[in-house]
Amino acid sequence: MRLKHTGSVEISTDPEAFEAFYRRHVEAVTRFMARRVDDPHTVADLVAEVFVAVLDSAHTYRSGLGSEIGWLYGVARNTLSAERRRTASELRLTSRISGRRLLDADDLLRLEERLDAESPVRRAFEAMAGLPESERAVLELVVVDQLSIPEAATALGIRQGTARVRLYRARRALRHAPGVTSPTVMEGLR
Amino acid sequence: MNFEERLLMELKTEMSERMARGPVRRPMRRRLLTGVAVAGLAAAALVAVPMVMGTESSAYALTENPDGSITLKINEFRNSDQVERDLADLGLKADVSYVRPGKRCAPGRFTTIDEPSFTPEELRSKDPGVRKRVLEAMEGTPSRQAYDTVPGGGLKIYPEKIKPNWTVVMEFTENDDQTSGPERPRALWQFLFQVTDGPVKPCVVIDDPSWDVIGPEGLPPAGS
């Protein structure tokens, strides 16, 4: 197999590169958050936080380690877990850019529609709640966020083989759990 | 203007303020030096220096790691014969070729022991299911088990995955233009790494029409 390596991009210093990166991914990041959080204001805050974190950690992106989206989802996961460790008021204090302040009525409506659209997925997350964290993380990224296994491995900073094993275990664990398994989770299972 | 546009403006403002402030602290760096990583890094640093091969030029660096793996870092694409000799000193039979951008070695000069074979249709398929299956099968081949890529351009080779009678065939191509970005993505370098238990004929250089094709995830169309 031949692999091609594209260069790492200075997205934190080149405004044009950053804008291109932002436009490529803002939709995906919003959906990522809408699948996990059910309040539009918090989603807006988190989307803003993710891209601020991108500016902070762009130097950690190495194209050789996996795809851009895999890396970005890793950043999004870290942002979300940091948020879950804090209370809402703290988040608003520490955040350099307040996402919710940038929402107008139309945006709010749009976000709420998106949240409605993602609600079956949020229920699927509940079905996965009993899995060990390491396995659940892989299942989430592959099944819910539709990342490839290599991308999910990049997002989690683990080897592809490890990701594959965890995915297999998670699916096997959920296979015989009647009532908890949503079709989304079992997608691709024989 | 909607939320996405307003947020982009805010972010760009944040960016220019940062640049005006000068180089930023990089808090993420500290994370590299926590837990298990510390032990691994320290051990590697101690062993790395004396293990670097003496005969090499600065064109590449060959390092034996404490876990038995070998890191091959290529700085300049010359002197592939010396790379072969140095790898032989480490007990690894290798056939290394550097080829110019847009070129490759003609196929059929050796027979790989990798089992899974796919039809050209499967390899070129855009269907996510087929792609995934092909990619996974490729990941599991004896060749793929024997190396990893190293950030910044290099390979980590696992000799314990390579049987004594096997030869490692490596082909490297480096782009003259080392800039790449979202506006104009291009391959900086590409390589082929396969193991064979048979003879390897010399590389006959031919055109590689896939050189300029970049697929999703920075991968070329599978099978090129």
Image: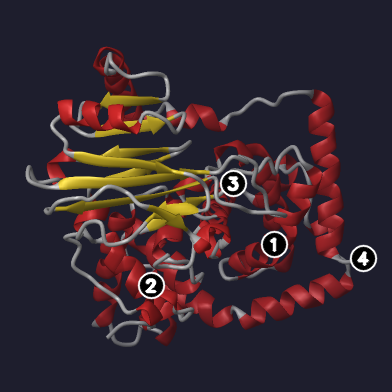
Marks 4 and 3 sit apart, C-alpha to C-alpha, by 31 Å
- Tags 1 and 2 on a common chain: no
Mark 4 burial class by Cα count in 10 Å: few <14, some 14-19, many 20+? few
B89 or B71: nearer the viewer: B89
Q: Which one is nearer the viewer's eye here, B113 or A19?
A: B113
Q: SS for tag 4?
A: loop
Which one is in front in this view, the residue at disc 4 or the one at disc 2? 2
Secondary structure at badge 1 equals: helix
| Circle 2 residues within 10 Å: few <14, some 14–19, many ≥20 | some
Give the residue at x 69% y 57%.
Answer: A47
Q: Position of residue A92 (x, y in %)?
A: 73, 47
Image quadrant holding the C terminus of chain A, namely bottom left
Which mark lies nearer to you, 3 or 2? 2
Name the mark on residue B132. Answer: 2
Tell me the subunit letter for badge 1. Answer: A
**Is residue A90 visible in this depiction of the protein?**
no
Q: Circle 3 sits on which residue? A: A86
Looking at the rendered structure, the kind of residue marked 3 is Arg
For image coordinates 16% across by 25% down, the residue present is B89
Q: Which structural element holds mark 2?
A: helix
Q: Which subunit holds the residue at mark 2?
A: B
Q: Which residue is mark 1?
A: A24
Residue A11 in picture, x, y percent from top left: 70, 44
Q: Nearer the viewer, mark 4 or mark 3?
A: 4
Q: Is residue A128 above or below residue A184?
A: above
**Above or below for A149 versus B14:** below
**Location of mark 4 (residue):** B1
Which of the labelled discs sits on residue B147, or is there none?
Answer: none
